[in-house]
Image: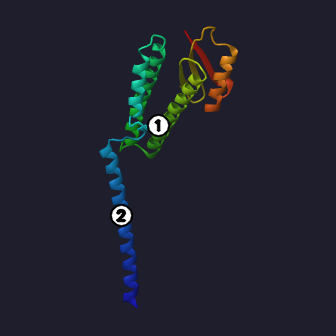
Amino acid sequence: MKKLKLWKRNAVVLAIVVFVCGAVYMNWSYNQEGLEAGKQLGEVTLVDGKSWKQKEAEETVAESGADDNTYFSEARLNRQEARDSALSLLREASTDEKASEDTVEEANVAIQTMAGYTLTEAQIENLVVAKGYENCVAFLSDNSISVVVSGTENGLESTDIAKIGEIVMEQTGLSADQIKIIEAD
C-alpha cells in the first residue's frame, strides 16, 4: 500500500516537472525566434513587408519633393524623431534588469500609448486628406490635439473646420474645446 502511494506521488511530481520543463523550453524557443528575426517590442511590419519606419521615411522623401509639402514632411519627420528618441528611452527602462516592476509596467504602458497616438494621428491625417484637403499633420497628446491643414484658395471656412473637427472627435473622443485646427500658409 505504501509503495502504491509513493509511486503515485512520484508520478505526479514527475508529470509536473515534465510540464514545467516543456513550458520553459517553449518560452525559450519563442524568444529565440523573436531574436533571430530582429524584432523589437512595438515594431510593426506592414503588408508590403516594410517596417513602419521604412514606410514613414519613404513617404517623407516622396513628399519632400514638393515645396508646399515641406512643412508637413518636416513636421512628420520631427514628430517621428522625437517619438523614436522617447521610445528608445522607454525600451531601455523596460528592459533594465535593475528596474522595478512598476517602472517596467509604466514604460510598457507609455510605449503602448505612443503606438496608439501614432495610429490615431495617421488615421486623422488620412481621413482629412480623403475629405479633399491637400495635406494634414496631427499632433496628439493626453488631453488635446493640434491639426495643421494645408491652406485652401479661400482659406479654411467654418464648414472646413467643422468637417475636420468632426473627424478628430470621432477618432479621439476629445471635445471641441480640446481640438486646435490651424491652417498652414
Picture disc at residue 111: 1
Q: Residue 101, image x and y in percent?
A: 44, 46
Along the line of sight, the residue nearer the viewer: 66 or 11: 66
Q: Secondary structure at mark 1?
A: helix
Residue mark closest to the camera, 1 vs 2? 2
Q: Is residue 81 in sight in this rendering? A: no
Residue at 67% in and 13% down: 157
Residue at 37% in and 83% down: 7
Q: Is residue 124 left or right of residue 4?
A: right
Residue at 39% in and 70% down: 16
Along the line of sight, the residue nearer the viewer: 150 or 168: 150
Q: Which residue is disc 2 drawn over?
A: 22
Q: Is residue 154 left or right of residue 134?
A: right
Q: Quadrant of residue 85?
A: top left
Picture disc at residue 100: none
Circle 2 Cα neighbour tier, 10 Å, few/some/many (<14 / 14–19 / ≥20): few
Circle 1 Cα neighbour tier, 10 Å, few/some/many (<14 / 14–19 / ≥20): many
